[in-house]
Image: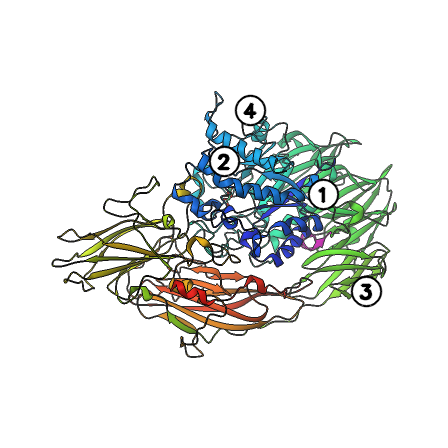
Amino acid sequence: MVNGERLFVFSGEFHYWRYPVPELWKDLLEKIKAAGFNAFSIYNSWAYHEATLGHLDFKSGAHNFTSIMTMAKDLGLYMIIRPGPYVNAESNAGGFPLWLTTGAYGELQTDDPKYTAAWKPYWQKVSELTKPHLITRGGNVILFQIENELGGQWKNITARIGNPPVQNYMQALEDAARDNGIDVPLTHNAPNMFGYSWSKDFSNATGNVDVIGLDSYPSCWSCNLSECTSTNGEYVAYQTADYVGYFGKQSPTQPNFMPEFQGGSYNPWGGPEGGCPNDIGADFANLFYRDLIYQRVTAISLYMAFGGTNWGWLAAPVVASSYDYSSPISENRAIGSKYYETKLLTLFTRTAKDLAKTERLGNGTSYSNNPAITVAELRNPDTNAAFYVSRHAHTPSGSKETFKLSVKTSEGALTIPRNGGAITINGHQSKILVTDFTFGNKTLLYSTAEVLTYAVIDGKETLVMWLPAGETGEFVVKGAKSGKQTPVDGQEIKSASVKFDAGKDSVTVSYTQNAGMTAVDLDDGTRVVLVDRSAAYKFWVPTLSNNPLAPENDTVLVQGPYLVRTAELNQNTKTLELTGDIDSNATAIYVFAPKAASSVSWNGKKLCTVAKNGNLIKAVLRKPTGFQLPSLGPWKSADSLPEISLDYDASSEAWVTANKTTTVSSFKPAANNPVLYVDEYGIHYGSHIYRATFATTSSPPTGVALNITGGMAFGYSVWLNEKYIGSYLGLSYAGTGITDFSFSNATLTTDGKDNVLVVVMDNSGHDQRAAAVNPRGIYNATLAGTSSYTFSSWKIAGTAGRESNIDPVRGPWNEGGLYAERIGAHLPGFPDSNWTALPSAAKTLSVPDAGIKVFRTVVPLHVPAGLDVSISFRLTAPETNSSSTFEPTAPGYSNRLRALLFVNGYQYGRFNPYIGSQIDFPVPPGVLDYDGDNTIAVTVWSQSAEGAEMKVEWNVDYVHATSYDMRFDAAALRPGWEEERLKYA
Ligand code: GAL
């Protein structure tokens, strides 16, 4: 209940730190609002806000998340906030700052005082910033999640013997939140039904929260299905899970709350490109979200509503650059069938006030005359409205089934439909059919078509129902006696297929849904709009105020456009002002508006009404103009691996001497090795360059054995005395690479002078959960040969400024330690006048042998106002691996490379074609300058003596006409190069 009103919560998640352009957050939230969600949720990221120990940043660039809470209020969306401190989220170390991963903070996620002192400042600040935005203080934040999927609170669950370090930790987080003014209910999400919840209904143990939630990914959270078998069991498409039992046991007095329910799934390295939409598309949304209602869940948050991008090195090793997540809103801001299909249900749950209070009176196959169909009966005890959720009894089945349904109504028990025909479930589908459903002052006795929404316009009810085209529907409205079809713009159902049957105090309407939209007007003034699925997809219910409950007399109905964002009734001009987006087709727009609106405007322009019928107005919206990108280039290039030169002076501020001999980490380095774990030296992200020396006399060593951990998909390359001696190319599923390299290619000193070994490695991030403290870097480097030589010194170069976060706007994970990155060659304004120019038509970026080069070009963009042009980069190598077990044997493979794409200084793509398989990298406006010069930089690290080459192109994903100003001024997000950078050379 919010402020005394019951609410069915339908929310979706996004991560502002995966979308570092604050100017775009409103675009996203408008899309969430337009979809009919009444809430959204966020994770914060401790790592993002406290990259440097003791320096909290909630201000620069996208770090200021308070604007999101303000927008929640302005747009009318409730908000769930989930600050961690640990979040998981396929993020580097699960969202822990990387300085926390060295082992120096005791056992993480316990009451260890060292760990406690570490999380407190961040936690206090998040609480403090959230406080003014709580619902209790006039804001829209309704729930505050403590920790994420935390288990281990029981030593013995049956005997209820707790584990104090974990319980005390939860309690300390709760106490600290309360002390800092968080007075909304505290929640937690329990993982996949296997843990034991922190529910007060389950025990009165220390650390329990007010409302326990359950997260669930019945279709697997990764498109690498093998990752899911340990918790999900064998993968079966469209297999739903049993939540009723869980909630009945864990939280019978609390709302059945799913703080994370599958909204898609993530893309592992080597996984299919562009998300993994198989089995989690529109059908999944239709069936599974309705199944949650079948199981009487009353608060749902989809993970994710919008995934975003794993830009920079924010990701955990398992995921590639994309975090599209196959979500309703794509990484490139587009909406499609998954969004539209979800909207059919969110609009219904938002409008069906009776659904906010129900009891599940029964379920099973006896409700219908078809044993393949099961039905759950949910009934509102106050209004007697009921919801019959019907689906296949065996959910993996996609057969076409027809049936009649037994319902209990205010007019007694009925079997519906009564006038012939049947209810159809065709494919992986479900239907929620209502009885005694209140809409405005009217009652729908029953309907075999699904209710989409309703509004009360000028005191008259307009009810919208949808059915797949060709299916039959039947509904009864009480209080009316007759009706007639009112064709919408010539679209009507053949009169033979629509029948009005007057009852004592009601009218029964039976029909076969045709393609498109038509209307039925009843004699009591009620209008019923009948739409098929495609017309329903483009049906919108913008609200006239910012009340998240979207009261029925506060909305208008609009059909037609790709997206309708907002509606406002301008009383002075008597204009209904609509905003939204048009895709590549001209669109007819139909508006059901109050009489007070004598005209309609679209994105600020008055529309020419082409037809008017009572409160229905039709107009036509023009398609957007086209847009062409200039081509990329000409390119310039420079070497980015001076470190291998014997003359290179490794004494700039980039370098740290790795001379620690002891570590608190429980992972001790191999014997005779200093501590070479990068995090111990304040180096955390991207590539690291090791430079080791050893002097030799007679019988020099013959090779080196290296054992390096860098996370899945990582790799490394090795040089001795300027000569390339080999690479570990990496595998999507391996986090450690153990390789013996021979020195036969190189010449070693015999006069006691230093030999120089250079190892360039990248680091795909820290693992999640307890494994976050697994070190990154060299575990063992041992020289091989007849005499036993050891290294005399080790130095490491990493991210410029190391832990001091010298680019606070872009933040900590944007860059690694390649030479080009350290000197800032990826930044706008870097002086590249002495670089080598590639021929102006050159499109291929190549490195002739093993090595690293950096390429740059500056390209102007001028996107006209009023357009949303979605741009993505395509990176390709002659051979791009698409299989995760790929291991090339033939020489000459030109895909043995690791490339980083920088757009105006933002690392927006990691291209590892040998590992596979992401090639398309969407980049949002704000990172791109839509009205100015854009600096594109690409580092190409060839891991092969034969060299490597690749191509960079950019493409327009779509052009939409939009009300959203995509030419916003975000210059502050793109700070330029400064000379200071050169000290990291
Ligand atoms: C959940 C976790 C999320 C995310 C998700 C998979 O278990 O709470 O943070 O990792 O799995 O995408």
Q: Which residues are magenta?
A: 532-541
What residue is pinned by disc 1?
A: 138
Residue type (three-letter) at the residue carrying disc 3: Thr
What residue is pinned by disc 3?
A: 609
Asked if marks 3 and 2 touch (Cβ < 8 Å), the reply is no
What residue is pinned by disc 4?
A: 203
Provide the secondary structure element on which disc 1 rests: loop
Which corner quadrant of the image does residue 174 belong to? Answer: top right
> On the picture, is 314 further left or further right than 947?
right
Q: Residue at x 41, y 66 (%)?
A: 982
Structural crowding at the residue carrying mark 1, measured as other residues with C-alpha within 10 Å and reported as few (<14), some (14–19) or many (≥20)? few
Mark 4–mark 1 distance (CA, rounded to whole Å):
33 Å
Marks 2 and 1, the one that precedes in the sequence? 1
Residue 446 location in percent, x, y? Answer: 76, 38
Provide the secondary structure element on which disc 4 rests: loop
- Colour scheme of the rendered structure: rainbow
Foreground disc of the pair 3, 1 = 1
Residue type (three-letter) at the residue carrying disc 2: Leu
Mark 3–mark 4 distance (CA, rounded to whole Å):
63 Å
Check residue 150 in the rendering and tell me which mark sits there, or answer none: 2
